[in-house]
Structures are given as structure tokens and as C-alpha cells.
Image (cartoon, rainbow, N blue to C red):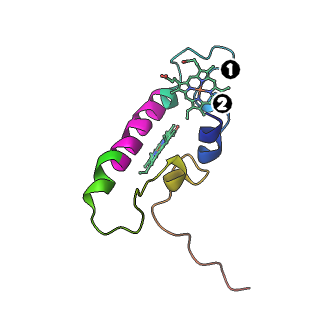
Amino acid sequence: MNGWTKALGVKCNHCHTLGAWEKEDEPAKQIARDMVALTSRINGESLKEIKNLKSERPSISCYTCHRGAVKPETAPAPPAQPQ
Ligand code: HEC
Ligand code: HEC
């Protein structure tokens, strides 16, 4: 779960009410479970269907998409303005 806070750039309270860890009051908590399922589907099924990849066991993680942010980017950042 420490890995998740780093991968998403959040603190524990993004998915929990501090001290009441077992509560299900933060939507992000269930989303995290669904994201675990998504990630294992990609690793366990989708990537295996692609032939001729370099790695013997190609895989992704939360960080592959999130890169320290709650909302993954879908396009590269615009180029920096010339000085
Ligand atoms: C991205 C969402 C997310 C973040 C961030 C997160 N957790 Fe969790 N946490 C979960 C989920 C989902 C579960 C339930 C796992 C399960 O269903 O087995 C959980 C379960 C727990 C539990 C056990 C209680 C329970 O509901 O099963 C504790 C204690 C806990 N987390 C502590 C922490 C601490 C401490 C941090 C910060 C370092 C943290 N969590 C950060 C999603 C998160
Ligand atoms: C294939 C890319 C991908 C992977 C891998 C992935 N995510 Fe996500 N995640 C997304 C996208 C896209 C969203 C939706 C962002 C938005 O709201 O537009 C999202 C949203 C979330 C949210 C909701 C954030 C919020 O708004 O509160 C949580 C929590 C989350 N992801 C946790 C995880 C965790 C934990 C993992 C690893 C187990 C993971 N994600 C792996 C793409 C990914």
C-alpha cells in the first residue's frame, strides 16, 4: 500500500478515513481493487496475446500508468515555451 501511495502520489487518506481503515467510505478504495483486477488482466491475459515482445514476461504496474499522479496522462506534455 506504500507502493500505491507512491505510484499515485497520494497519502493513505485518499482511500481511507485515517484510523478507520476497514471503512468503505472512500470510492478510491473500491477503485483500487478494480485497478488491481485490471492490472492482472493486462499482465495475465492481454500482454500474453501479443507475440514477439522483448521481455520473456512483459508486465505493467500501477506506476506504468499513474507515474505519481491520480489521473494518468493520455498525451505528452506540450513543449516548453522558448525563453
Ligand atoms: C489506492 C488506495 C489505497 C491507498 C492509497 C491506501 N490503501 Fe489501505 N487499503 C486499500 C484497499 C483497497 C484495502 C482493502 C484490501 C482488501 O480488500 O483486501 C486496504 C486495506 C487497508 C487496511 C486493512 C483494513 C481493510 O480495509 O482491509 C489497512 C490497515 C490499510 N489499508 C492501511 C493503509 C495505510 C497505512 C495506507 C498509507 C500508507 C494505505 N492503507 C493506503 C486501498 C488503499
Ligand atoms: C492501464 C493503466 C492503469 C493502470 C495499470 C492502473 N491504473 Fe488506476 N487509473 C487509470 C485510469 C485511466 C484512471 C481514471 C482516471 C480518471 O478519473 O480519469 C485510474 C484511476 C485510478 C484511481 C481513482 C483515482 C481517483 O480519482 O481517486 C485509483 C485509486 C487507481 N486508479 C488506483 C490504481 C492502482 C492501485 C493501480 C495498480 C494496482 C492502478 N490504478 C493501475 C489507469 C490505470
Task: Please state the horizontal and vertical placement of residue 53, each as a whole percent of the image.
Answer: 35, 67
Element under label 2? helix
Residue drawn at x 74%, y 85% is: 83
- Looking at the rendering, the stretch of residues picked out in magenta corresponds to 30-43
Judged from the image, the quadrant occupied by ligand 1 is top right
Residue at mark 2: C-beta within 8 A of ligand 1: yes
From this view, report whether residue 4 is shown above or below residue 82. Answer: above
Task: Please state the horizontal and vertical placement of residue 50, each as a whole percent of the image.
Answer: 28, 62
On screen, residue 29 versus residue 68, left or right, reads left
Residue drawn at x 60%, y 46% is: 7
Q: Name the mark on residue 27.
A: none
Pick whichever of labels 2 and 1 is earlier in the sequence. 2
Q: Is residue 33 magenta?
A: yes
Residue tagged 2: 12
Residue tagged 1: 18
Q: Residues within 10 Å of mark 1 (few under 14, many from 20)?
A: few
Task: Please state the horizontal and vertical placement of residue 72, each as a whole percent of the image.
Answer: 50, 53
